[in-house]
Amino acid sequence: MSLLNYVLRRVLLLIPTLFGVTLLTFALSRIVPGDPARLAAGAQATPEMYDQIRQEFGLDQPLPLQYWNYLTGLFQGDWGRSILSRRPVVDDLRVFWPATFELVLVAMLIAVAIGIPLGIVAAVRADRPADQVSRVVALIGVSLPAFWLAILFQILFGLKLGWFPVSGRLAALAEAPETVTGLYTIDSLLRGQWSTFGESLRQLALPAVTLSLPAMATIMRFTRATLLEVLGQDYVRTARAKGAEERSVILGHALRNALIPTVTMIGLSFGWSMGGSVLVETVFDWPGIGLYATKSALTLDFMPIMGIALLYGFVFSIINILVDVTYGMLDPRVSRS
Amino acid sequence: MTAPGATPSLLQAVPRVTGERRFRLGESQIRAWRKFRQSPLSMIGLSIIVVLLAVAIFGPFFVPYPRDATGALNIKEKLDPPSWQHLFGTDQVGRDIFTRVIVGARVSLIAGLVVIVLAFTIGTLLGAVAGFFGGRIGEAIMRLTDIFLTIPDLILAMAFAAALGPGLLNVMIAVSLVWWPGYCRLARANVVALKDSQFAEAAQSIGASRGRVLFTHVLPNAFPTILVKASMDIGFAVLTTAALGFIGLGTLPPTPDWGVMIADGRKYLREAWWFSTFPGIAILLTVLAFNLLGDGLRDVLDPRARRRA
């Protein structure tokens, strides 16, 4: 199967899955115990106001029709409106997504930049003290409650030491750089606004490090495991036998093959970090999708939740496809079937 | 090719069993225990879990301020730092945080265990059916897991928790509903790998029914890797229920919930560092202990995966 056919097939398979996602979240939104219209209308609402809201949001129509309207709306770029803020969900997602994407991206960069070298060290020193320490550190890394660690960071690095700001994406009075990509770091660089760039990096520091830890631990252990496996193979023994230096055996011969499965892990970690960002964003008041999700869930505002689930489902699936395609290109033994 | 959402390490953890290994306490289990005992990290994990279980079962009878677990108010003693009277300090209404962390252990462990038992049961049954019988039903089950695994865990758990309403029971149901697909995938992969093995064929050839082959021959052999996952997941289930509590979608006050306590303490960062810190340590220890246990169990039950993770 050619690459193009393969990608097309995977994208086509996405459609029923995403269709299922809309069905699942729609069903959830309609079993909510509190009546959303009542909630939006407020306690003092007259029956007329209540009816008006029900009508405005189509809640008075039969369920299948409501779903049909939602579904056809999706294709026309209408993802519904928040029943509380009355804003279109698509507009909100467009505003919040770059913030989350930037946070997750920086967290993944940190995780990869530190996780892979540490994994190599752990593999080279397998079963020696350094490796044991790395195992414990990695297990702690995945066991830490992110929301709690975030709070500890705020107390220590924010309040006690005053090194980093503890909330938001920009300081209170700072002005956001002109939007190009929506990522403040990149936009400020494109405009040559160095102080804004530094400022946005400082804002990113604590949330990104918090978010990176579980991914870093996973990537580190995974690099160690795959590298150990490769180091046991014949061609590595051959390289050693012909007198290659240990350094070049590991970095030149073994690592390239060991990193192939790690690519998969990095892709998956990206998806998990999108989920994990909910907690980190909530603690650091980071104006992204995660904070939006928390606020919407707490107010039983289900239209945004449905939109977020669909967006994340889409992004996650695309990442999976990219990972599989990359894997296939890096490792010729993998067949696309 | 990895299926979306399934971790490669788990896929590769599927054992290639040729002879039948029944899951029954016998010589191999004793040997496994000896091996498990040799790993200090696994034993540390097991010890923490034993202590945690003891605390969860007996702790609430011995706490210094039992009334503080149910919503007593001692405003005069609010936000007192740790002292001999209050080992972990007091919270915003003067309740003893030590007492609430201890009682919270019971809440958290019950939540973790119930979630895993539910997710394990639903997932393994559906996965076994999908793997063994295949066909349209099997296909439908696996497509359903696709849908669930496409949405990040926490977002889906939040949606379920919000839709079901607050309360411990609903939180447990919400998290189980999010987690069963993981077990379903793993069980299916195991069953598919085992169903054509010689012992399954042998059982069938002497006249065992399909159901009997599945439930008494194939499934018991698929259990070890699923159990490893379950033992690790108990910790993560504790973590996820605490996270929902932290967000505000969890238990109702005055139930002492570690996640809710951390959220409450967040409002007093400047004056009371101990408020959020101690419940967080409790969560960390719990999750870590189950991870260590799972890691050790994997080495013992699933030697093929030893080098991984």
Image (cartoon, coloured by chain):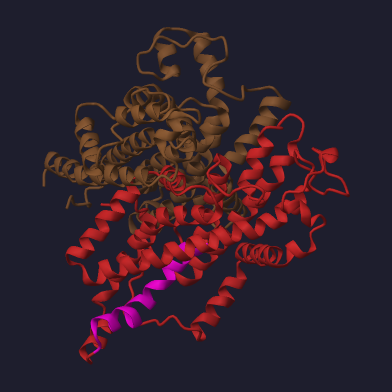
- Predominant SS of the magenta segment: helix
Q: Position of residue B253 (x, y in %)?
A: 64, 47
Q: Position of residue A62 (x, y in %)?
A: 24, 41
**Left or right side of A171 for A157:** right
What residue sits 41% from the left and 36% below the top? A36
What residue sits 54% from the left and 65% below the top? B296
Tell me: residue A170, above or below residue B51. above
Q: Colour of chain B?
A: red
Tell me: residue A309, above or below residue B285. above
Is B230 one of the magenta-colored residues? yes
The number of numbered badges drawn on the structure is: 0
Looking at the picture, tell me which residue is in the foreground, B231 or A312: A312
Q: Is residue B289 visible?
A: no
Q: Quick one: which residue is furthest to the top in this view?
A: A192
Looking at the picture, tell me which residue is in the foreground, A281 or B196: A281
What residue sits 44% from the left and 39% below the top? A273
Is B129 one of the magenta-colored residues? no
The region drawn magenta spans: B208-231
Tell me: residue A197, above or below residue B211. above
* Figure chain in brown: A
Q: Quick one: which residue is furthest to the bottom in this view?
A: B206
Q: Where is residue A68 in the image (x, y as percent from the top left)?
A: 20, 38
What residue sits 36% from the left and 26% below the top? A93
Looking at the picture, tell me which residue is in the foreground, A292 or B170: B170
Tell me: residue B194, above or below residue A80. below
Q: Position of residue A25 (x, y in %)?
A: 33, 43
When asked about the image quadrant of residue B288, the answer is bottom right
